[in-house]
Amino acid sequence: MPTLTTTLIQSHLHWEEKASNLKMFEEKINGIHEKTELVILPEMFSTGFAMNPEKLAEPMDGSTVTWMKNIASKKNIILTGSLIIEEEGHYYNRLIWMLPNGQFGYYDKRHRFAFAGEHEKYTAGQKRLIASVKGWKINLLVCYDLRFPVWSRQSPKHDREAELEYDVLIYVANWPERRNHAWKSLLIARAIENQCYVIGVNRIGEDGSKIYHSGDSMIIGPLGEEIYHQEHKEDIFTYTLQREHLNEVRSKFPFWKDADDFFIQS
């Protein structure tokens, strides 16, 4: 059964300084000596959680996406994280899923954080992105999406013997320390209710709005068990997800077969 080796990078961010952030993350990625297949960066990793898209947004052929292509190719990894993208007059908080061969998928954050005015600056996404690698299906979401369980819920199948929709749920975030209890609790809840691995990658440090982030990046197993948790400091952590364990949990405790049917209308 294939495994999937992932690396989480929990880091401070240079406020609205793209070049500094890209240089910093390149150094961190180059410093990863373990074999890894997927490297996960925080939300808006090149700028911090900024509400100045008019100043900071770039097109899909801009410097940050080009940087992601180069790093993924050079290191032979999948690289993911979100950044500020401008497209057809709209701004998006867009997660990029960059493959080593330069092909990519993307997910536009659906739930915009109105408490900080994100809904006034950014356009909401309308569809999920479930990527596939080595037989693993990975649902990719962004920060505030975590508070809305319907959007991440495994889609019901009329054939209850069919495979589940995805195996890993990833959240990239700039989640403040003052609400970190919700962050940690909801990551665990998403793992339990969807019987999957959950990975949350958050930043640390104070941003340009004087908001402190404690990190609290986590890996949660399909029973809700805590595999990894780091707070208040930078860290680069590599872990191999075990397909055998996931299959055993789903087989021994097939709770997903009793789920309610529902349909999400965009």
Image: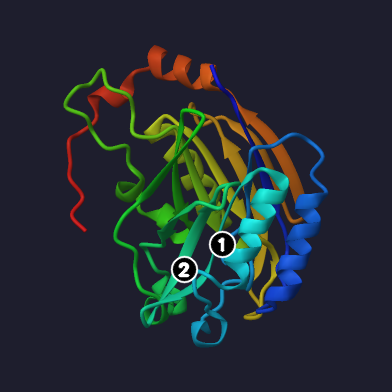
Where is mark 2, residue-wise?
Answer: 93
Q: Secondary structure at mark 1?
A: loop
Residue 232 picture location, percent across and down: 74, 56
Amino acid type shown at disc 1: Glu
Could you tell me which quadrant the C terminus lies in? Answer: bottom left
Answer left or right for 118 relative to 150: right
The front one of 218 and 2 is: 2
Q: Closer to the camera, 150 or 76?
A: 76
Q: Mark 1: few, some, or many residues within 10 Å (few <14, many ≥20)?
A: many
Q: Could you say which is closer to the camera, residue 97 or residue 161?
A: 97
The residue positioned farthest toward the front in the image shown: 101
Disc ID at residue 182: none
Secondary-structure class at tag 2? strand
- Residue drawn at point x = 50 percent, y = 75 percent: 59
Give the spatial CA distance, label 2 vs label 1. 8 Å
Residue at screen point 73% across, 41% down: 237
Q: Picture quarter containing residue 194?
A: top left
Q: Whole-percent x and y of residue 151?
A: 32, 50
Q: Earlier in the sequence, mark 2 or mark 1?
A: 1
Q: How many marks?
A: 2
Specify the amino acid type for callout 2. Asn
| For the residues bearing labels 2 and 1, Cβ distance under 8 angstroms | yes
Vertical arrangement, residue 38 with respect to residue 56, above or below:
above
Compared to residue 55, the image places residue 21 above or below, namely above
Indicate which disc residue 43 carries.
1
Looking at the image, which residue is at 71% across and 67% down? 22
The residue at the point 53 percent across, 70 percent down is 61
Q: Residues within 10 Å of mark 2 (few under 14, many from 20)?
A: many
